Image: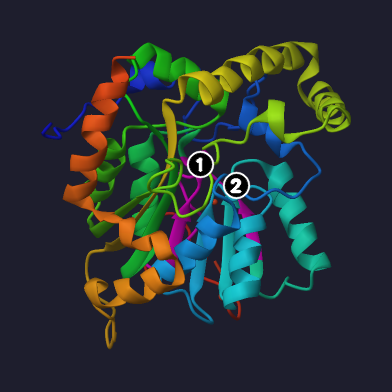
Amino acid sequence: MMTAVPLPLPSRSVAFLSMPSNEPGTDVQASTVPSMLDLVRLSPRLLFPPGGVDLYRQIALLTEMSADDEVLHVACGKGVSLGYFVTEFCVQGSGVDADPTMVEFAEGRSRDDGLGDRLQFQTGRSDALPYRDEIFDVVVGEIGLANHCDPADAIRELVRVSKPGGFVVLVQLVWKAPVEEVRRVVLAAHLGAQPLMVVEWKRLLREQGVEELLVQDWSDEETAFRSAVVKPFLDFAELFTLTEKIGILRRAWARWGWKGVRTLLTREREVHRLLTRERILGLDLLKGRKEGSVQGSTETPAAESEPAMAAEHPKAAEAVDDAAYEKKVAPKASAESGAEGTETAGLPLFGNEGEQI
C-alpha cells in the first residue's frame, strides 16, 4: 500500500509564468491570452459548472444549507450555481468574480429573476475578498479560484471570511497522476484554472485551520455521485454546436483580437486531448469546517449526519474520509503515472482594509 506523503506546491516563480500579474492593483483581466475557461464563459448559454446540479445539491446537503444562511461563492462566473442555492435553499447569496463582465451579467440576471434582494455580486480577486472577517456560513471556491493568484492565498481568504465552525468547500480540478511541473503551468494556462493533487488541496486547507475534511471524487465512474462519467472540465469541442462555436469565437475576436482567437484554437485542441485521451484530470469536492465553534450551535456530529446524506444519494456511502481517500486514490494515481462598508439587510458587511468586526 502506497503511503501518501506531502507534495511540494509549484513554486511562485514557475507556477505563474503564464498567469496575469498578481501584484496589488493589477487588473487580472489585462491578459491578451485568453484561456478555455474564458472561452466557455463567452457562451450565452447558462451552464452549470462541471459536476452539474447534482454536485451543487450535494454541497447544500453536506453544508446543511438552510434559509437565511449567508453563502459566498468565489469565482462565481455568471452566478448560475449561486442562484440555485438561493432559489432552492432560500439562502442569502454573495458572489465574487475577477471578471467584471461576468459580474455585470450575473447582476442583471438576478434582477430579471426578482432575486436582487437575496443575491449580490462583486468584482474582486480571490486572494483579496472585499468582505470583513468571519461573516459567511458557507464559502465555496469554484474552479477559477486560483487562476490569477497563489492557491494558498485564495484559500486563506476563503477561511478568513468564514464564521468559526462555518463550512469551507472547494470544487477543484485535481491531477489524478503526477504531472511534471512545467507541464502543469502550461496546462493551467490553457485551462484558466490551477489543478493540484488532492493531497495538495487538503494540505492547504489544513494549514489554514480547516478541520473534518471530506473528499468526494466527481469524475471517477466508481466514486462519483451520478450514473455516468462526466468530464471534469467543460469540453468546448463537444459542448457547443457549430453555430454556437462561431458565435463564441466572434465574441473572442471582439475582446482579444485575432491573436486571442488563434491562441484559443490551439488551446482547445490541447485541452480536448487532455480530457479525452490522457484522462489525468479529475474533479473533486472538498468540504471541511473552519476551526472553532458558533456560540449556541446545535451542530449535529458528522457521523450522525452521514446516514441522511446516504439516503438522499445512494452512492454517498462511497464518500471516504481523509485517510481512506488517500489509500484508495494515491495507489491509482501512481499506477496511472506510468502511463467569488455598510450594513444592508440580509447582506454581509463590506469592510475596508485593516478594519475588524
- For label 1, the SS is helix
Q: Earlier in the sequence, mark 1 or mark 2?
A: 2
Q: Which mark is residue 223?
A: none
Residue type for callout 1 = Ile
- For label 2, the SS is loop
Magenta residues (range): 120-145
Q: CA distance from mark 1 to mark 2?
A: 8 Å
- Which quarter of the image is occupied by the C terminus? bottom left
- Which scheme is used to colour this image of the protein? rainbow
Q: Circles 1 and 2: CB distance less than 8 Å?
A: yes
The percent coordinates of residue 69 (x first, y second) are: 49, 76
Q: To which quarter of the image does residue 200 belong? A: top left
Q: Which residue sits at x=53%, y=39%?
A: 144
The percent coordinates of residue 25 (x first, y second) are: 54, 35
In the rendered structure, the answer to whether residue 233 lies left or right of residue 43 reads left
In the rendered image, the vertical position of residue 177 relative to residue 168, given as above or below: above
In the rendered structure, the answer to whether residue 150 lies left or right of residue 164 reads right
Estimate how packed mark 2 is, as few (under 14), some (14 to 19) or many (20 or more) residues with alpha carbons within 10 Å: many
In the rendered structure, the answer to whether residue 110 lies left or right of residue 162 reads right
Q: Which residue is mark 2?
A: 49
Q: Which residue is mark 1?
A: 143
In the rendered image, the vertical position of residue 355 relative to residue 51, given as above or below: below
In the rendered image, the vertical position of residue 202 relative to residue 344, given as above or below: above
Q: Which residue sits at x=60%, y=47%?
A: 49
Q: Nearer the viewer, residue 308 or 249?
A: 308
In the rendered structure, the answer to whether residue 331 lies left or right of residue 58 reads left
Please name which of the two marks, 1 or 2, marks the residue nearer to the observer: 2
The percent coordinates of residue 109 (x first, y second) are: 78, 60
Q: Which residue sits at x=65%, y=64%?
A: 83
Task: Indicate yes or no whether the magenta region holds residue 133.
Answer: yes
